[in-house]
Image (cartoon, rainbow, N blue to C red):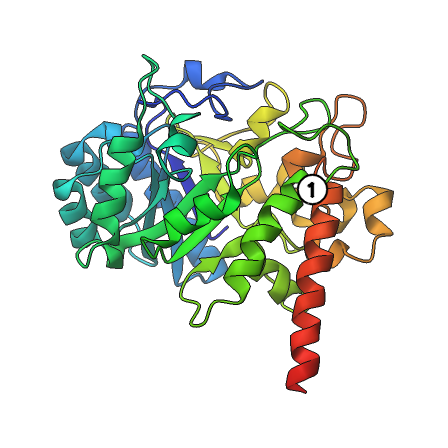
Amino acid sequence: MTTFICKVASRCNLDCDYCYVYRHADQSWRRQPQRMSMRTAAQLGRRINEHAVTHHLREVNVILHGGEPLLLGLPYLRELCDAITEPTKNVTIRWHGQTNGVLYDEATLEFCRERNLSFGLSIDGPAEAHDRHRVDHAGRPSFAGAHRALTLLSGDWGRPVWGGVLAVIDLRHDPLDVYRFLRGFEPPNIDFLLPLGHHDLRPPGKDSPGTTPYADWLLRIFREWYDERPQPIRIRRFRDVVALHLGAQNSSEEWGLQPVDLIVVETNGELQAVDTLKVTFEGACELGLNVFDHSFDDALRSPSVRARQDAWATLSPICQACDLVRVCGGGYFPHRYSDEAGFNNPSVYCADLMKLIREITTVVDQDLARLA
């Protein structure tokens, strides 16, 4: 494990209608303490250091996550980071976080610069696109707060600690309008997220398995992005496809067949598998482990994690026979689920992934042929 997603706050100040933590099958957040205690944070630090020594790791990634991590307030967040750091004498921590931006202000930016803590910002595009889904518990829009954070992070002072943008795709909004709005702030990267769904929870606008609305949406952005020179913005989904097509072995979690190297730590210290599995069924993430009684090596040996380490063994026969599997990796794990077959299915986005990969790699191959 090299990436530790730490659920430091189990509640959120927004009520996004697509949220996988609060709006889907697994409701385990209700039994979690509202914030991670200092005792749990210190034990987490000891377990990280133990794991780093065992596996000769020089650095690891710690991601402050939630809920909304900034609900803790800066004094508590500072103390929490210190509690995790103090026992990690043998490894360097690279700090990251993910925020909806509503509470991100100048004081937060100062704290992030002090700690070299980079926050990614969740924002779905201009106001109309963003506020369709991302509202608070009273139904009020959140764009103003997210836009304030976007302005801070895109300035000279914020850019060194800006982790980029996460934007969930909504087919009802023009992809180029969304892209051009975000591109105007020159984020270091943009990750356009497919809505979390599976075969029993069909994604919006995905009327049948063979349709490709999400590929069509993304390809309009790809054609504009690919031709931009210079090209300072990384769009992870496109870069992963290109890299894996050209022989890379590693990519982000959604692509390729490399073992998963992340683990989730809940506010009470429970160790869990990737948290997006919460969209599938109650308890899908649970490993029966915690930082007080178990090591991260115990997590590596758990059946749920081992299944993600041997990515090939978890693929359906259809995926194993596909010529694109080395790039798509069978699709994101939660997207494969159905009540009938578990995860032994192609992705619910299979047709979209095939079209996206084939069109991107055709363009790349044509360019390589011209260069040759």
Q: Quarter-wise, where is residue 187 in the image?
A: bottom left
Lateral position of residue 216 relative to residue 325, left or right: left
Q: Is residue 86 left or right of residue 75?
A: right
The residue where tag 1 is placed is 307
Q: Is residue 341 above or below residue 5?
A: above
For image coordinates 54% across by 37% down, the residue present is 274
Q: Quick check: 170 above or below 13? A: below
- Which residue is at a point 28% across and 56% down the rendered structure image? 89
Residue 333 in picture, x, y percent from top left: 66, 39
Q: Is residue 178 visible in this depiction of the protein?
A: yes
Count numbered badges in the picture: 1
**Percent position of residue 281, x then y:** 63, 20
Q: Which residue: 57% across, 35% down? A: 171
Depth check, front residue: 50 or 315:
315
Image location (x, y in percent) of residue 30: 43, 14
Q: Is residue 167 above or below residue 206?
A: below
Mark 1, Cα crowd under 10 Å, few <14 / some 14-19 / many 20+, is: some
Say whether residue 308 is left or right of residue 193: right
- Residue 165 coordinates in the image, percent (x, y): 39, 47
In the image, residue 142 sits, relative to residue 239, either above or below, namely above
| Residue nearest the observer in this picture, 337 or 15 | 15
Q: Label 1 sits on what residue type?
A: Ala
Is 278 in front, or is 79? 278
Label 1 residue SS: helix
Q: Residue 197's quadrant in the figure?
A: top right
